[in-house]
């Protein structure tokens, strides 16, 4: 099947139309963002009088719910607050709120992306924010698959073991970086944008700008 | 003894929490603090500019609208300037719609230039050639039409 991509299209036994479709779908997120940006819903949200502003406000206000409760969990993990309360109990009481906040964050954030897919995709701060989001998820996953497996051993400890403290600290730092990067997203436009060339090659690379014809 | 120990713990916790708050505060320092884009974060109050040119694009989009005009300089060189306005809802209120500034129409703009030195600025008002002014409702001083009549 590798022959499909060898450039000799006419000589493969796969119909031309199939090759084209595969080529396009596998091609790039950029094309997808261009397509998404041209959908009526995306345009309507981008040009809306109130909806976009409401979504933006929800996204920012949800910080209180999501990062606020997550920060308490992380501080408990670090042994810096509620030392007399079992970690499991803190989790049971706060996690539903953290999860609800996260859901709201993802929904409102996706809508903000949907309103201007290309602008977000070609934004260095947005890209960095997504990387940090993945790192946060990895941090949570590492915590749950290592030190949290042995939770019964340290659940009541005022100060949890080093691994748990480290995970909590890393999470706090990542949330802070995530918020700063999110706040910086709208400022790239004053610094540079892909539509105004020439720009330094490093910026074009980081932002995924397409220069020249394609 | 036990009581003393408890007090010590609470003291330590309080110090730790204050420490955390300071660290978090330091982390957040680079973030500009105003409601939405602070005018002064991106634009220079000491660099006002009068532009006159032909509309090339009108983007009535959130969170900020952009008006693009081709301005011919004294040397005959044409520069495409981007002029930031408020969100669409503000421009609608002030009378700028998708059809009120057709591509190719000649307009004047009073604005403040971007600090980055790019050909971008934040508009205070648009002036039609017949003298009619429309405020751009953005972050520029006077752009809401309250103080600059």
Image (tube, rainbow, N blue to C red):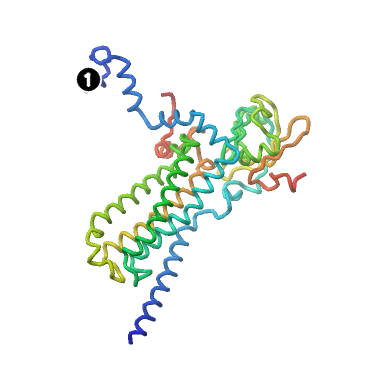
Q: Residue at image x 66%, y 26%?
A: B102
For label 1, the crowd category at 10 Å Cα-Cα, with few meaning under 14, some 14 to 19 and many 20 or more, is few
Q: Nearer the viewer, residue B51 or A52?
A: A52
Q: Position of residue A55 (x, y in %)?
A: 52, 44
Q: Position of residue A124 (x, y in %)?
A: 43, 42
| Location of residue A90 (image quadrant) | bottom left
With B40 as the anchor, is A157 left or right in this view? left
Q: Residue at image x 41%, y 42%?
A: A127
| Location of residue B87 (image quadrant) | top right
Question: How many numbered marks are there?
Answer: 1
> From the viewer's perspective, is residue A181 above or below residue B72?
below
Q: Residue furthest bottom?
A: B1
With A65 as the anchor, is B68 left or right in this view? right
Which image quarter holds the C terminus of chain A? top left
Q: Residue at image x 63%, y 46%?
A: B139
| Location of residue A89 (image quadrant) | bottom left
Q: Residue at image x 42%, y 73%?
A: B15
Judged from the image, the secondary structure of the residue bearing numbered disc 1 is helix
Quickly name the residue at label 1.
A3
């Amino acid at each position: 099947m590798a022959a499909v991509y060898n450039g000799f299209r006419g000589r493969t036994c796969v119909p031309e139309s199939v090759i084209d479709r595969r080529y396009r779908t596998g091609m790039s997120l950029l094309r997808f963002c261009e397509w998404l940006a041209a959908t009526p819903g995306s345009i309507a949200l981008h040009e809306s009088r109130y909806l976009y502003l409401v979504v933006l406000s929800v996204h920012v206000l949800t910080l209180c719910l999501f990062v606020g409760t997550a920060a308490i969990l992380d501080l408990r993990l670090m042994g810096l607050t509620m030392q007399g309360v079992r970690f499991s109990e803190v989790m049971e009481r706060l996690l539903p709120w953290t999860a609800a906040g996260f859901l709201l964050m993802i929904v409102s954030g996706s809508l903000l992306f949907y309103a201007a897919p290309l602008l977000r995709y070609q934004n260095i701060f947005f890209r960095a924010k997504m990387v940090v989001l993945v790192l946060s998820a990895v941090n949570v996953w590492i915590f749950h698959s290592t030190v949290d497996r042995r939770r019964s051993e340290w659940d009541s400890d005022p100060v949890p073991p080093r691994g748990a403290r480290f995970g909590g600290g890393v999470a706090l730092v990542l949330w802070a970086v995530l918020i700063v990067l999110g706040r910086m997203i709208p400022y790239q436009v004053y610094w540079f944008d892909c539509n105004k060339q020439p720009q330094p090659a490093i910026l074009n690379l980081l932002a995924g700008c397409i220069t020249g014809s394609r | 003894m036990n009581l003393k120990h408890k007090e010590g713990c609470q003291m330590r916790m309080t110090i730790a929490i204050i420490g955390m708050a300071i660290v978090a505060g330091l982390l957040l320092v680079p973030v500009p603090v105003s409601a939405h884009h602070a005018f002064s974060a991106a634009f220079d109050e000491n660099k006002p500019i009068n532009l006159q040119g032909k509309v090339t694009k009108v983007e009535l989009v959130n969170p900020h609208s952009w008006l693009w005009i081709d301005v011919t300089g004294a040397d005959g060189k044409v520069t495409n300037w981007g002029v930031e306005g408020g969100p669409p809802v503000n421009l609608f209120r002030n009378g700028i719609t998708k059809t009120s500034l057709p591509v190719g129409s000649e307009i004047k703009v009073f604005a403040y230039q971007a600090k980055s030195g790019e050909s971008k600025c934040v508009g205070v008002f648009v002036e039609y050639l017949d003298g009619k002014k429309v405020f751009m409702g953005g972050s520029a001083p006077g752009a809401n039409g309250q103080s600059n009549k």
